[in-house]
Each structure stands twice: as C-alpha cells, then as structure tokens.
Image (spheres, rainbow, N blue to C red):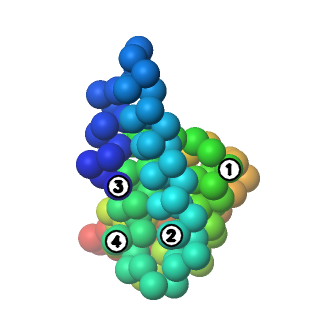
C-alpha cells in the first residue's frame, strides 16, 4: 500500500489518458485493500493495520470504503489503547483524520491516547 500511495503523489496532476488510467487503477487498489482489510480485520496485527491506514491516508484516497475502514479501526483502537504502542495510536489517529473520519468518532480515541501517553510518561 505504501508504494502505491507514493504513486498517487507523483501522479497528482494527471494529464494524459495513461496517467488517468493509472490513477483509476490506484483508486481501485485502495478500494480493494480497504475492503479486504475490513473483511480480515481480526487477522491483522495492530502495527500492520495502522500501516495500511497510514498508506491509504497518505494517498488521500477518500471514499466511503476507506472511511469505513478508518472508522472501524478507530473504534477498535479506542477500546484497545492500553495495548497499543504510542506510534500505532498516533498513526491511527492521524490517518483517520486524513481520511475524514467524523470528529465525534475521533474524540474518544484522542482522549484515550492522551490518557495512555500521560500514564506511560516517566514520573
């Protein structure tokens, strides 16, 4: 996913029909990746799941499918913050923001992330 997200950046201003076809292929890839990740979400480790979101978020490919995946991951992460690394928590939160997850959905995650980071801070 990450390598394909970089293609999106370089083809951001598609002008030829070949570039348009490539852009459509990249969009189809992210749709398929999001659908597959939602279907198999229980098979992913948190680091891998957050990496998928990071790649999709960097591509800025927004669709109902990618937004649904991000929303689903946010709900799961909110309930699992105490088990997650700080990097995974931040990756999920930032990527979900990039994918336009609703603020009401993100708010509980942000609160949990803040609490987890504060709890882990040296005293």
Q: Tell me the residue that label 2 is attached to.
A: 37
Hey, which residue is sitting farthest right in the picture? 104
Question: Tag 3, which secondary structure?
Answer: loop
Q: Which label's residue is closer to the chain start, 2 or 1?
A: 2
Q: Which mark, residue 64?
A: 1
Answer yes or no: do the residues labelled 1 and 4 have beta carbons within 8 Å?
Answer: no
Place of residue 10 in the rendered image (x, y in percent of width and height, measured from the top left): 29, 28
Alpha carbon separation for disc pair 4 and 2 = 13 Å
Question: Tag 2, which secondary structure?
Answer: helix
Alpha carbon separation for disc pair 2 and 1 = 14 Å
Alpha carbon separation for disc pair 1 and 4 = 23 Å
Question: Tag 1, which secondary structure?
Answer: helix
Dividing the picture into quarters, in which one does residue 109 lie?
A: bottom right
Q: Tell me the residue that label 3 is attached to.
A: 1
Dividing the picture into quarters, in which one does residue 119 lie?
A: bottom left
Alpha carbon separation for disc pair 3 and 4 = 14 Å
Q: Residue at x 40, y 75 (%)?
A: 46
Alpha carbon separation for disc pair 2 and 3 = 12 Å
Is label 1 or label 4 in front?
A: 1
7 sits to left or right of 35: left
Q: Quadrant of the N terminus?
A: bottom left
Residue 113 appears in the figure: yes
């Amino acid at each position: 996913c990450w390598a394909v997200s970089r293609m999106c950046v370089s083809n951001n201003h598609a002008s030829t029909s070949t570039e348009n076809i490539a852009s459509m292929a990249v969009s189809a890839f992210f749709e398929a990746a999001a659908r597959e990740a939602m279907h198999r979400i229980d098979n992913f480790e948190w680091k891998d799941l957050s990496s998928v979101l990071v790649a999709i978020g960097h591509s800025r490919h927004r669709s109902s499918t990618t937004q649904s995946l991000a929303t689903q991951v946010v709900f799961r992460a909110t309930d699992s913050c105490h088990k997650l690394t700080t990097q995974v928590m931040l990756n999920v939160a930032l990527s979900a923001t990039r994918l336009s997850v609703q603020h009401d959905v993100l708010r509980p995650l942000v609160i949990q992330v803040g609490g987890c980071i504060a709890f882990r801070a040296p005293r």
